[in-house]
Amino acid sequence: MKFYKAFSWVLLLTMFVQIISVLRTALLAKNFGISNAMDAFNLANTITVCIVNVVGVAVTTVLIPYLTKMKDTDEDRRILHTFNTAILGSTFVLMSVYFIGVGIYMNFQQTTSELSFQKLTLYLTFLLGIGQYVRLISNIQTAYLQVENKFIKVKIIGFLTSVFSFIYILATPNISIEAAAICFSLAYILESLYLVFANWGNKYRFAFPSEWRNIRFKELMKLTLPIISTSILYQVTILLPLVLVRFFGEGYISSMAYANQIVAIMQTLILLNLVTMLYPTLSRAFQKNKETAKKRLVFFINGCNTIMIPLVFGTVMLGQLLVKILFERGNFTAETTQTVYLFLVFISASLPFVVIREFIFRAFYSLGDTKTPVKNSFIVIFIQIGFLIIASLFMGIYAVMLSPLVAAVSSVILGFNKLNKKIGRIDFNYQLLKRHLITIFNSLIMCVAIYIAKNNIKINPLLDFIIYLVLGIVVYASLTYLFQRKYLLTK
């Protein structure tokens, strides 16, 4: 009960953050639509996130397991801060190399409209990069609080900083794209300052990073290096579709970004919150008893997808109406709504597989195996690249839309095969398949109810959406209570 109570508060605060974020994006959509400026902004934001995540992924995969075992000693604190210094320093070097390399490349190019787009992207990357780098510091500070089960504190500051950036953009009707980038970075800086003070004086207090030759620090780095390799490949799979989509014309990058904004609501509310809260528990379980951990893993995957799968089905039924309500005004047209909806459907279809993949990877990390996810990602990146190159020749933009699903499914298949060999098949595949089929059945019945309502209830877009949504939730919740309550409440 304590977990469900904490998760309810975290879910509520995250929901508020996502609502504010969507409203903020709606303001940007009204001002910039799917223009070159918005394309440059979204591409720059993705580039900075990918650069930071190359090394920053070690915060969740290596740092958190270390924190769960860390003692309140000077040596452990020095190891901690030596590792953090390595993460922050490596990220700074990566960002510097990017800016220097791209700057030199552009210096030798002739002036064209595409070069102007590239220059704007580089400038926005610098402005947004400051905020993303500071956000890496926030992620480290957040890890400290998460291990201490102080999840609500983290969400409160996330909400306050989101409100700050929303009010700033709202109060500046004719805001420039550069000012918007500065606003985002400033919000991340405020968030980081709050988190640093929130951890002030506890066992994670700063200790001079002097353990570069310590064997335990070297063990952390040995775990980190394979994960960085995996992360590089994963960031490539994120950037590659954006680079390709630019070749299909202006506006597609922005269309994908708007769709991702909506998908991020589902990902952040359900996937990130649950994985973040459950990962320390899963890690501890694998350290104590493999059989118990295996049951926990299956239960966590089933539980997450009991929520994620109906959200995907709901997106198919209500996504177009949702995009229209959120963004269709000003420079955002009805034609753009249709394009964003298509991206939304294809991207959201991959989410249940992303849930499974994330838990599979964390099972390997909890077992001290960082090599298998690397091998998995190497194979998946080549599958995705091959699919994009070949499929784009005859599918066009739809190949880009499908690529996240292809990557996620491939990763799950490969990961399952390896994990089954590593921890055994005892009640593993059966429970997973059975519970997912029940969830899909419940979701299909929910869709039928929404379809009937859409054909009989038409008042105005917002009220219609609320009615369809509430109906869908009631139908699905009732079916879940009927068919799955014993499983979900007795584990």
Image (cartoon, rainbow, N blue to C red):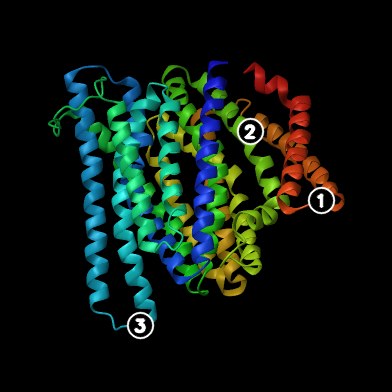
The first of marks 3 and 2 along the sequence is 3
Instruction: State the CA–CA distance, disc 3 to disc 2.
Output: 55 Å
Nearer to the camera, 407 or 291: 407
Residue 333, position as x, y percentages in the image: 62, 67
Front position among marks 3 and 2: 3
Identify residue type, mark 1.
Lys
Q: Which residue is mark 3?
A: 112
Picture quadrant where residue 483 is located: top right
Residue name at image x 29 percent, y 44 percent: 134
Q: Which residue is mark 2?
A: 429
Identify residue type, mark 3.
Thr
Local secondary structure at mark 2: helix
- Quarter of the image where the C terminus is located: top right
Identify residue type, mark 2.
Asn
Local secondary structure at mark 3: loop
Taking 395 as reference, is 60 left or right? Answer: left
The first of marks 1 and 2 along the sequence is 2
Nearer to the camera, 282 or 458: 458
Instruction: State the CA–CA distance, disc 1 to disc 2.
Output: 37 Å
How crowded pointer 3 is (Cα within 10 Å; few <14, some 14-19, many 20+) is rated as few
How crowded pointer 2 is (Cα within 10 Å; few <14, some 14-19, many 20+) is rated as few
Taking 477 as reference, is 185 left or right? Answer: left
Instruction: State the CA–CA distance, disc 3 to disc 1.
Output: 48 Å
Taking 414 as reference, is 320 left or right? Answer: right
Nearer to the camera, 41 or 253: 41
Residue name at image x 18 percent, y 27 percent: 78
Residues at discs 3 and 2 in contact (Cβ within 8 Å): no
Residue name at image x 26 percent, y 48 percent: 91
Q: Which mark is residue 454?
A: 1
How crowded pointer 1 is (Cα within 10 Å; few <14, some 14-19, many 20+) is rated as some
